[in-house]
Image (cartoon, rainbow, N blue to C red):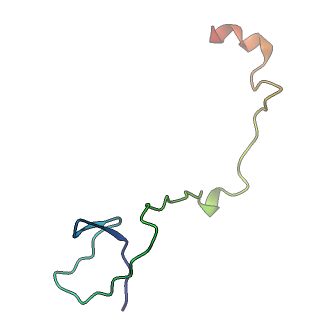
Amino acid sequence: MLQSYEAIIENGQLKWLTDAPKVSKARVIVTILSDTSPQTLRRTPPASIAGKGKILGDLVSSVLEAQDWECLK
């Protein structure tokens, strides 16, 4: 089975961007990409929380009532 791992080669040394493969010896094929800047991973919320958000306030009105502002001082 083929598996892919991301790494960067600097001065002939390999630096793994993900967990290193658990092999002591293997035949590999190396593809050199022109862009060497690391990719940033985009975080996504789990599907189990979809539709469960609640908007409490906005930029115009406060979440708290005016009489509760005194306790915040």
Q: Nearer the viewer, residue 29 or 5?
A: 29
- Position of 6 compared to 51: left or right? left
Q: Residue at x 71, y 47 (%)?
A: 53
Q: Position of residue 17 (x, y in %)?
A: 35, 64
Above or below for 2 versus 69: below
* Res 72 → quadrant: top right
In the picture, residue 32 is in which quadrant?
Answer: bottom left
Residue that appears at 24% across and 90% down? 27
* Residue situated furthest left in the rendering: 24
- 40 horizontally vs 32: left or right: right
On the rendered structure, is 72 left or right of 30? right
Which residue does the image show at 43% across and 61% down from the upper left?
38
Q: Which quadrant: the N terminus?
A: bottom left
Residue at point 82% right, 25% down? 61
Q: In front here: 62 or 30?
A: 30
Front in this rendered view, residue 40 or 43: 40
Q: Residue 24, how many percent across, how many down? A: 16, 81
